[in-house]
Image (cartoon, rainbow, N blue to C red):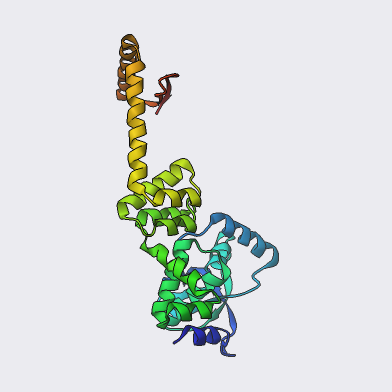
Amino acid sequence: MSLFSFNKHRDEIPKNKQIQDIELSKITPNKFQPRRQFSEESIKELAQTLDKEGLLQPIVVRENEYGYEIIAGERRFRAAQSLGWEKIPAIVNNMNDDQAASLALIENLQRENLNPIDEAKAYKNLMKLNNLTQTQLAKNMGKSQSYVANKLRLLKLTPKVQSYLASGEISARHGRVLVGLSERDQSRMVDEILDNNLNVKETEEIAKDVDGYFKKKDQVKSEKRTRVARRMPKDLKVQINTIKQAVKLAKDSGIKVRVQENNDPDDYRITIELKRK
């Protein structure tokens, strides 16, 4: 079944498929659900709307050996659960696995803001389920081919980088810059982006010569440590070592210790925070 014919099919629910009130306890989530993370805040907001206005659109389910499985409307189902509803209006539409998976993917892509990785996986699965090219998928989804291609490229990133994309800690544009880098460089770069709040332009500049950037950075750190060692009076070094030994003893005794050391040769500081566990 093509995606085009499926989109057409989804609006042609047979007349005998009437809305039923189904017990929530008999309904299970969609195993093809592309969304891996549900915002508790969005569920709470939707629950408030349901509580005030009721369910304006029934969920769609199909029968299975346990009762019913959600095809579309899992957020509505979760919101109803949070309100303690016993039943929920639903349309029973017994699709096969490919149809159910396609509808779940389309439902999420069209109605909710998926994170870049879940969106990319949804496109990939739709292409596989409906035997589509990127161009065909883009046309049927109302997107440009370049938009779909850029999303799919994010799946080439390492799991570490994908996790930061999924959580929103870095942007899809950051991710596209990192796609062509090695696994090691992707890891170093994503740490640098997060540690220094790099924008996309800054990330692009570093990505042109990752090894050169980090080599220069390491040299600067080494030179700074050398300057500190040379400028610091011998008796001060002894005192600092004594302090560090005291910190170690505190840690060994079960005290939570946090140490911040400023190695600026012109303004050396060491800050110690003690907290009992």
Quarter of the figure with the N terminus: bottom left
Question: Looking at the rendering, which quadrant does residue 31 occupy?
Answer: bottom left
Q: Quadrant of residue 28?
A: bottom left
Residue 143 x, y percent position in the rendering: 54, 74
Q: Position of residue 212 (x, y in %)?
A: 34, 44
In this view, the residue farthest toward the bottom is 15
Instruction: Give the side of residue 260 with respect to residue 50, left or right.
Output: left
| Relative side of 115 to 186, left or right | right
Q: Residue furthest right?
A: 53
Can residue 194 be seen?
Answer: yes
Q: Residue at x 55, y 64 (%)?
A: 113
Q: Nearer the viewer, residue 236 or 177?
A: 177
In x, y percent, where is residue 171? Answer: 49, 55
Q: Is residue 33 visible?
A: no
Residue in view at x 51 percent, y 48 percent:
199
Image quadrant holding the C terminus, namely top left
Look at the picture and state if 244 lies above or below 107: above
Going by the image, does 226 lie left or right of 109? Answer: left
User: Whole-percent x and y of residue 202?
Assistant: 48, 48
Toward the viewer: 276 or 5? 5
